[in-house]
Amino acid sequence: MSHLLAPHLLPPAIGALLGLAVRARARLRTHPLARALAMPALLLALTLAARAFAFHLAVIDTDEGLYLLQAREWLRGGWPYVAVWDMHPVGAPALFAVAMGLFGKSIMTIRLLGAICVASTAWLAYRTVRQLQGPRLVGFAAAVLYIGQSVVLGGLASNTEIIFAPFVSAVMYLGVRAAVRAAEAPRWRDLALMGVLMGYAMTIKPVVAPMGCLAFALLVGPAWWSGALRWRRVLAMAAAYAGLCLLPTVLFGLAYALRGQFQFFLYGSFLAPLAYAGGAVSVAEAWDRITYAATDLMFPLLLGLVAVAGLRRRSLNHPAALLVVVALLWFVAGAFAVAGPGMWFNHYFVILMAPLSILAAMGAWKLAWKLRPGLALPAFVGLVGAVAIHAWAIDTLPRLEHGWDVPDPPRQVAEIIRQQIRRGEPIFIANYHPAVYVMSGAGVPTRFAFPGHLTCEWDRVTGVDVDAEVNRILASRPRIIVVDRGYWRSMRRRVRVNLGTTLKRSYVKVAEVQELAGMVEIWRRL
């Protein structure tokens, strides 16, 4: 089914979704299903339009390619950590595998999954605003702002921060819904759903834990304060929630144990991330990355500050003030999630975009109504539109400058390799994108297929002698070796020496492809 996701079919698909939304809107008064589907369909259409370049590019982020490769091997029976190693939990490749099983083993499928996650998160932002009695237009503005912001800071890739966002947003929505009903004790079914959703989000990336704690506080805190919930039940619900949050991880661990491979799961899911976190960046480098992210998100941040600046203690009972407080707490919890690993990579800041979108929408609403009543609505629409388009343009305009027809180096490399090998034959990608394994139909020569773990600086997290593993791969004489000369110095010196010697003695260069930093070389065995 992957042919259904071809880039040239995107404009008709977007048009069809917009048409569905318009027709549904026209029948809102007469058809409940149309009323329910109108907003999600509109947001999905806007998401596909905003993320159109995601369907054009083979590689946006190298991590995404690793999840793609893990998912492909999983569908062939080789589980993550065992067939293809990583130091992240298995939730992301599991979702990739489900999507690929349904729609085909292609890059397009993964980008469609990312678009669905973005549209779902946008819709949940809308629903959260409405749950706290925010105006419908503010809810829609929050959704549009999230869609626009989702393409910056690496968010165009279907990375973990994009994939777990709908799970976290759903849990927050359920917590807010319970908080609104503070006079009633929280329902166990809401707790169960929140626990399972947050639990799965934790199998994608455990940094979501602070937001899970906030959602639980929203679930039980107001009810306890109102007297509708006793301490004993609060403690019981806390224990149940913690257990449910752990349940997906426990089930994955049990599945590995039944296969006799629990040691792989234990090291990849828990011990390796601890080793990775031990290498946090310096304060100066962290500050540089924070400043870069703040620059990209400058206008939403300014609007968010406008919303927060309007808070007054005497107005906290007003729904608008409560909405700002909830979004602010969500933003703070997200900040802890961003800071937790100590690495401050750009895509970590995508975690902040859902609550920031709500704050920015409220700030724009406040600014607009400072004007004369007749100008408030057009001013609000114009302000939100300008901020959303600006965020989208940060990523998209540089790509448009090069055009849609510019060659895509990873696809070119994959095509050359495909012509040189038998399908499924192992090759060795020394320091280039692991997605090329999937696009070329090649096999992997090692379970350490991610160059950062095998040949580059993060070798210490693997728990094995990676130099010995590289030597084993070279001794197996794979038919093809791929080297990105632009990042030749990113590999460890010992790897460069051994690889250079092997290429000189036993391989011939058959092709070169121009990449951003230099030439990607494809070498074939003599």
Image (cartoon, helix red, strand yellow):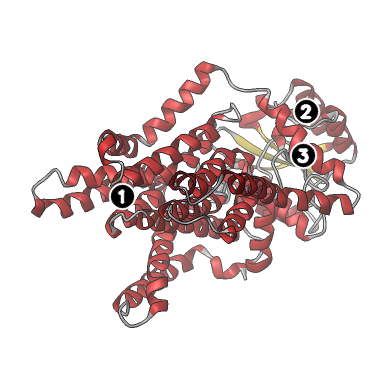
The quadrant of the picture occupied by the C terminus is: top right
The mark closer to the camera, 2 or 3, is 3
* Residue drawn 79% across the image and 32% down it: 462
Q: Name the side, left or right, on which 410 lies relative to 448.
A: left
Give the alpha-carbon distance from disc 2 to disc 3, as whole Å: 31 Å
Residue at image coords 31%, 54% = 134
Left/right placement of residue 444 relative to residue 361 reads: right
- Report the mark closest to the observer, 1 or 3: 1
Alpha-carbon span between mark 1 and mark 3: 44 Å
Q: What quarter of the picture does the N terminus occupy?
A: bottom right
Q: The residue tagged with tag 1: helix, strand or loop?
A: helix
Dot 2 lies on which element? Answer: helix
Reading the image, the residue beneath label 1 is 319
Residue on which the image places disc 3? 268
Q: Nearer the viewer, residue 475 or 140?
A: 140
Q: Which numbered marker is on residue 500?
A: 2
Count residues near mark 3 (Cα–Cα under 10 Å), then give few for <14, some for 14-19, many for 20+. Answer: many
Crowding around mark 2 (Cα neighbors within 10 Å: few <14, some 14 to 19, many 20+) is: few
Q: Position of residue 377 (x, y in %)?
A: 17, 54
Place of residue 502 in the rendered image (x, y in percent of width and height, measured from the top left): 83, 31
Toward the viewer: 200 or 384?
200
Residue 263 quadrant: top right
**Which three-letter amino acid code belongs to the residue tagged 1?**
Pro
Q: Percent position (x, y) of residue 375? A: 11, 51
Res 327 → quadrant: top left
